[in-house]
Image (tube, coloured by chain):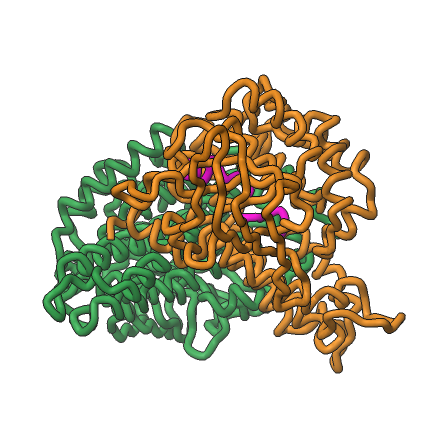
Chain colours: A green, B orange
């Protein structure tokens, strides 16, 4: 029983923390999301040199073959600096889909390139007015060409390729690989709530290749990859919340009104404590879910989706409350684009709607049969709590 | 990371269950699950635990302690709570016992520790006063030296289960001229049959009288009943508060209530079928589920940290969040019972269910969770100061 990093994982966290911290001075997120790239090329290069772009990719394909704890440690450190580099969206998530669905040929073609960090792949699943868990409205013709609209697609403006979910003639959902330069792509770019780059992408008879070849159904792989992503992103949320809290505590100590520091007012101090409590419990939940995914990967009976939903719901609720409070406790300053805390808050809110979002996760969790069993964090210690 | 108990810990846990389920009578556990434990239940259960070496595992080994690892201690609290075994009386095993074992003299240890472990003596706590609640050091009860006795005058209040008390450990002012209010306090042991003591029950919001006030009028305490040094009582009381507070988040209790409530909900009718299918109920249940998971994971992190010899400053967090989560669950149980649960007592024979019969009384009674043991506002103050530096 252990929910802490081991030595190597601790070292990984510190390495990423330092490397990303150097590229993100105060106000860093505002600066990089305002560039054409949308993130820092220098930090991206460093992440690549450290092998982090290959974290989730097998050694066979030049990756580090690391597990969910390494993913968590990396993303928590990134979150600490509100870093915008799309490790999870454009590398980890597509790598899981390719490893799960792709042919050996496709894996060989795509994964080593992802591992070096020299290419990114945008996963296009969301569609306007389409529930996340429904089959896509984008269709794949018999020749594999795609037609329909995906939105929002994060990082589409910089992506080298897309992985697009679409339904074939037989009504099966597949994941299709599309070159960003292919014919029949119309992109309308914009900004997400966290100032990250996001686009609507329209496909019109766009040539595409199905992962795994004709007829390979992707539902299970999509469920599992998105569940992994929901757990992974809780790591980023913890880093963001931790820094948001620290900035708020510092602000309460230094900002003066009525001739005294704000920390003189107990009502504000107690609200900061409640933020702390949210962060600490959310951290426990995120670590627990990460450990559960690790146990799943080593063969334990863990339901990946249900675990991810429980953790994602709890961390999203915490992230929302923390985002709101760190703005409120900063007063008008927290509302400005100039303030760092505003970007932490905005990113936290965007996280709650990622990979299907908190409401859908809660609906699944509430519908689950497991709801009527008492929860138990330890895998081999649940049987005693029955009615 | 690792989410499994080791084989040895599983064996240890199963050994605990053998005693908890095999030796502690089922009717006692049923009453405890409903929050209706009697004095006899507590005594019977503690003596059974003591017979099996399970009443005072955290004491020094010489006096019945077991020298457990933090994980074993965690499993002990967790299994007691999950199985609705009455907790050994906290005043005995978590408060006065450890203080006598640490600061008492040999004679006091011999006289009190075995009887305290076996609940042959029922201890009551004499700390709070009408003017000294959260601000405990402001207490006014005095103990003046008079020959070979202290003479106690003043008033104590909120004495939980004081109606059963044989003895009381009292924090009293022995030096009224000490420069700071924390100085000049002493830790005294008082036989409650001594003349000059008046005991009055305080009727509570749920109709129970589980707390009491005590009035002392020239009550004579032999000098040998001073624990440790005179005027050092505050440091002993603080030792007690800083003592490892295992099971403080009461996750096991929450898991028990959750399991019972979820099972009962299949059998509670609504206009649209069983409550178990009601989206509103299921939403609340899921909130409770994730809160319990996060609390248990926090508790496990603390436990693992102390395995590695690291102290964790989060006992205030566990107290604050644990009591809130438990109160929410108890409220959900009341909502589940609806008007069937709105009973303090009844002479009627037909009640909806055992759980419904206690739903409102338990809801009202358990509002105390966020008040006693250092109110949750006091805990926020502790966190602000020790963790956030505010």
Left or right: residue A78 versus residue B346 is: left
Q: Nearer the viewer, residue B24 or B44?
A: B44
Q: Determine the residue positioned at 52% across, 64% down.
A: A361
| Position above or below: B187 against A373 | above
Work out which residue is located at the far right of the displayed protein and give it.
B349
Q: Residue furthest left?
A: A259
Q: Is residue A91 above or below residue A138?
A: above
Looking at this view, name the residue that lies furthest to the front: B147
Residue drawn at x 41%, y 50% as measured from the top left:
B139
What residue appears at the point 20 percent right and 47 percent down from the top-left corner? Answer: A44
Classify residue A116 by image quadrant. top left
Between B170 and B387, which is closer to the camera in this rendering? B170
Q: Which residues are magenta?
A: B237-253
Q: Is residue B191 left or right of residue B22?
A: left
Is A155 within the magenta?
Answer: no
Label total for image: 0
Residue A343: where, in percent of width, then height? Answer: 22, 64
Residue in front for this viewpoint, A160 or B74:
B74
Picture coordinates of residue B351 (x, y %)?
83, 70
Report whether residue A283 is seen.
yes
Answer left or right for A300 relative to B245.
right
B365 shown above or below A385: below
Q: Nearer the viewer, residue B329 or A267?
A: A267
Of all residues, the one furthest to the bottom in this rendering is B271
Q: Is residue A214 visible?
A: no
Q: Going 19% across and 55% down the picture, which residue do you hit?
A: A250
The picture places residue A69, in percent across and down from the top left corner, at 41, 39
Q: Picture coordinates of residue A144 (x, y %)? A: 46, 64
Magenta span includes B247 = yes
Based on the displayed image, in which of its 4 quarters is residue B79 positioned? top right
B76 with respect to A26 (left or right):
right
């Amino acid at each position: 029983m252990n929910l802490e990093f081991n030595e190597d994982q601790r070292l990984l966290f510190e390495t990423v923390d330092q490397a990303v911290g150097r590229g993100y001075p105060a106000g860093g997120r505002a600066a990089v999301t305002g560039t054409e790239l949308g993130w820092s090329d220098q930090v991206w290069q460093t992440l690549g040199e450290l092998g982090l772009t290959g974290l989730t990719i097998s050694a066979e394909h030049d990756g580090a073959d690391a597990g969910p704890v390494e993913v968590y440690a990396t993303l928590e450190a990134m979150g600490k600096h509100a870093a915008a580099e799309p490790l999870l969206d454009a590398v980890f998530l597509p790598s899981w889909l390719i490893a799960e669905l792709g042919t050996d040929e496709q894996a060989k073609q795509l994964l080593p390139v992802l591992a070096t960090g020299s290419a990114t792949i945008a996963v296009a699943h969301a569609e306007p007015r389409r529930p996340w868990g429904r089959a896509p409205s984008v269709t794949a013709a018999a020749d594999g060409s795609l037609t329909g609209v995906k939105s929002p697609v994060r990082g589409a403006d910089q992506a080298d390729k897309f992985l697009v979910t679409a339904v074939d003639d037989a009504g099966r959902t597949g994941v299709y690989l599309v070159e960003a330069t292919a014919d029949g792509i119309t992109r309308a770019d914009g900004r997400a709530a966290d100032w990250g780059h996001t686009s609507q992408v329209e496909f019109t008879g766009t040539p595409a290749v199905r992962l795994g070849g004709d007829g390979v159904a992707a539902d299970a792989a999509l469920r599992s990859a998105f569940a992994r992503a929901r757990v992974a992103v809780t790591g980023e949320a913890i880093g963001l919340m931790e820094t948001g809290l620290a900035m708020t505590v510092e602000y309460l100590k230094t900002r003066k009104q009525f001739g005294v520091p704000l920390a003189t007012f107990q009502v504000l101090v107690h609200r900061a404590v409640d933020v702390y409590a949210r962060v600490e419990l959310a951290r426990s939940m995120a670590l627990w879910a990460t450990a559960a995914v690790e146990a799943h990967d080593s063969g334990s009976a863990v339901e990946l989706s249900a675990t991810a939903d429980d953790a994602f719901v709890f961390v999203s609720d915490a992230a929302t409350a923390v985002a709101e409070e760190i703005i409120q406790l900063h007063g008008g300053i927290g509302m400005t684009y100039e303030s760092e805390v505003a970007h932490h808050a905005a990113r936290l809110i965007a996280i709650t709607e990622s990979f299907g979002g908190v409401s859908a996760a809660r609906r699944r969790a509430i519908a689950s049969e497991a709801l009527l069993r008492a929860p138990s964090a330890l895998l081999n210690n649940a049987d005693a709590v029955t009615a | 990371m690792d989410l499994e108990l080791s084989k040895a810990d599983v064996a240890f846990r199963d050994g605990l269950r053998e005693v908890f389920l095999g030796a502690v009578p089922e009717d006692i556990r049923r009453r405890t699950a409903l929050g209706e434990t009697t004095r006899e239940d507590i005594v019977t259960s503690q003596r059974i635990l003591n017979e099996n070496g399970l009443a005072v595992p955290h004491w020094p080994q010489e006096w019945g302690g077991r020298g457990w690892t933090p994980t074993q201690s965690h499993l002990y609290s967790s299994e007691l709570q999950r199985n609705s075994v009455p907790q050994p009386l906290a005043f005995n095993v978590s408060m006065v016992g450890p203080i006598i074992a640490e600061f008492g003299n040999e004679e006091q240890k011999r006289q009190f520790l075995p009887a305290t472990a076996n609940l042959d003596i029922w201890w009551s706590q004499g700390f709070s006063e009408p003017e000294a609640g959260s601000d405990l050091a402001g207490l006014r009860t005095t103990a003046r030296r008079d020959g070979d006795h202290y003479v106690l005058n003043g008033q104590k209040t909120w004495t939980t289960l004081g109606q059963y008390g044989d003895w009381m450990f009292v924090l009293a002012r022995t030096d009224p001229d000490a420069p700071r209010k924390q100085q000049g306090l002493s830790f005294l042991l008082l036989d409650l049959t001594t003349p000059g003591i008046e005991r009055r029950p305080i009727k509570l919001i749920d109709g129970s009288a589980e707390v009491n006030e005590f009035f002392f009028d020239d009550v004579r305490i032999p000098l040998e009943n001073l624990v440790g040094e005179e005027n050092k009582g505050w440091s002993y009381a603080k030792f007690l508060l800083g003592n490892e507070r295992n099971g403080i988040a009461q996750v096991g209790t929450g898991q028990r209530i959750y399991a019972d409530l979820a099972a009962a909900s299949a059998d509670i009718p609504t206009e649209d079928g069983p409550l178990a299918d009601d989206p509103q109920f299921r939403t609340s249940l899921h909130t409770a589920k994730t809160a319990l998971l996060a609390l248990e994971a926090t508790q496990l992190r603390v436990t693992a940290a102390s395995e590695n010899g690291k102290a964790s400053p989060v006992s205030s967090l566990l107290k604050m969040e644990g009591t809130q989560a438990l109160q929410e669950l108890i409220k959900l149980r009341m909502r589940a019972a609806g008007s069937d649960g709105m009973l303090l007592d009844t002479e009627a024979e037909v009640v909806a269910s055992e759980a419904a019969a206690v739903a409102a009384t338990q809801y009202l009674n358990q509002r105390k969770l966020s008040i006693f043991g250092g109110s949750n506002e006091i805990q926020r103050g502790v966190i602000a100061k020790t963790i956030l530096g505010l």
